[in-house]
Image: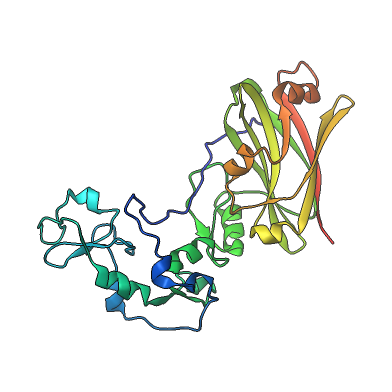
Amino acid sequence: MSSTTYLDDARSEIIDPPKNEEMLDVTELVGDHAQLSPKPNAMVSGNVRELLECPVCLNAMYPPIHQCSNGHTLCSGCKPRVHNRCPTCRHELGNIRCLALEKVAASLELPCKYQNFGCLGIYPYYCKLKHESQCQYRPYTCPYAGSECTVAGDIQYLVSHLKDDHKVDMHNGSTFNHRYVKSNPHEVENATWMLTVFSCFGQYFCLHFEAFQLGMAPVYIAFLRFMGDDAEAKNYSYSLEVGGSGRKMTWQGVPRSIRDSHRKVRDSYDGLIIQRNMALFFSGGDRKELKLRVTGRIWKEQ
């Protein structure tokens, strides 16, 4: 078998609205709205939305909203970037707050930006961003660990993307038996490898195998991720086993949602961890070539 090619991993994160020392707690403006359930559809004028768009970063503005003496507004995060000059008229900004626009924003209710993915909720303006960061309909990012892939979509779209664009092996069934070979394991430090994607119980799972430094020690880790949300992932369990020369190591755990990046899972050591010396011992021979057989199974909890 040819040696495996390793690529740096990728991760994604949710970007919160700009924060600084002046950022206000907006709960006083919206009362108990944060606890409300999604509301029926409502319409908000596009002109009002444009008023709440920062002319610099084009993101929605949150208190404190600043304005110049001519009434042009911008968000608190962009104010330091324009060196206290209005980006529209170039007048000095000063420290004028646009309280009227902040109150207008507090009165608005907007649809979730993931409504095209199935979310029908309507949320208070100042609660909308928090909801969207946790919305169950928000798209998933590509779980492939070996490239800077920015593709996002629903699960079925990502499964097709992994198969067609990343050429990931697809496997039907809840048991697996894979062999991992590396001709020169001493070259491996921080490397990633997705073994395959499994389809079972009407769901999809990603099996990862990675090499990284744990302190000063080079180690390998194998773990499973669930292609879905964390609440669903907890309905399943899995086991992994690796061994050789009459010895074996086993691991049992709950698959992590692909909402968590593979790096986050790895750095929490939530998987089967194998010291490199032990991995080479399992490989047998002169211990100069890594030959690990990873077996396991997935099951649904009753």
Vertical side of 237 occupied by 208: above or below: above
Residue 104 occupies quadrant: bottom left
Vertical side of 107 occupied by 69: above or below: above
What colour scheme has been applied to the protein in the rendered image?
Answer: rainbow
Vertical side of 57 occupied by 81: above or below: above
| Tally of numbered tags | 0
Q: Nearer the viewer, residue 130 or 166?
A: 130
Q: Nearer the viewer, residue 243 or 55?
A: 55
Residue 79 is situated, as x and y percent measured from the top left of the image, at 23, 53
Q: Is residue 86 left or right of residue 121?
A: left
Q: Is residue 196 left or right of residue 99?
A: right
Residue 168 is situated, as x and y percent measured from the top left of the image, at 63, 48
Q: Is residue 148 left or right of residue 217?
A: left
> Hey, which residue is sitting farthest top in the picture?
286
Q: Residue at x 59, y 59 (%)?
A: 160
Q: Residue at x 27, y 77 (%)?
A: 47
> Hey, which residue is sitting farthest right in the picture?
246
Residue 301 is situated, as x and y percent measured from the top left of the image, at 82, 58
Q: Residue at x 47, y 54 (%)?
A: 14
Vertical side of 60 occupied by 250: above or below: above
Q: Is residue 66 visible?
A: yes
Q: Is residue 176 visible?
A: no
